[in-house]
Image (cartoon, rainbow, N blue to C red):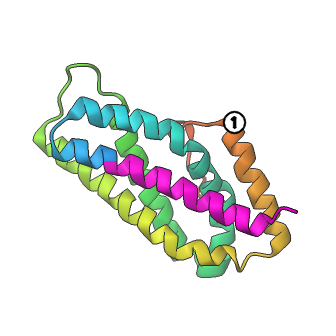
Amino acid sequence: MTDPVRELFDDFRHDHEVLGHGLHDIATALRSARDEDAADAARRLDLAAGAHIAFEQSHFYPELRKLIGAQEVDRFEDEHARGLAAIVRLGGIGPGQELSAAERAELLAQIETMQVHTDECGEHFGALGRIPRERQAELLAALRDLREQAPRWTALVPDRTAG
């Protein structure tokens, strides 16, 4: 017998590990002025994180808004937007292109904001447990459906009207 509560928690935690590793790779490359490596890592993360970001924005954040309030969830969405802006910019870097030091610093700040966001999201795993079991099963199905669709993060448009 499967446990949707445990599976949702495990899937959510796994996704955050993937996101955290990808952000770390980008930040490390930016700190070393390896712009092409940062761009490659951003493109990989664009593919790897899209389903989870879509899940958070479309399914989890509306639930979280009910539990912790709009102000904090609005902040999370703003952090997603900063991360997305960095992924879009880095993904546009072509072979041999280099960032200016100022742009690299700005992108690093955006990535670091997203890293803090990813770390803080771990604190909200507990909120999953406050969502009714039946709804958690629905959320798990939605997350897995999004994984099958495999949207890119850069293809997502934030929905500020949800919740």
Figure quadrant of residue 160: bottom right
Relative horizontal placement of residue 132, taking residue 89 as reference (left or right): right
Amino acid type assigned to the residue bearing label 1 in the image: Gln
Please provide percent x and percent y for residue 64.
Answer: 63, 72
Up-down: is 68 above or below 118? below
Q: Residue at x 80, y 66 (%)?
A: 3
Q: Callout 1: 10 Å neighbours few (<14), some, many (20+)?
A: few
Q: Which residues are magenta?
A: 1-24
Residue 161 seen in this snapshot: no
Q: Residue at x 67, y 42 (%)?
A: 147
19 drawn magenta: yes
Please provide percent x and percent y for residue 136.
Answer: 77, 66
- Provide the residue designation for mark 1: 149
Name the residue furthest left: 101
Please provide percent x and percent y for residue 48.
Answer: 52, 41
30 drawn magenta: no
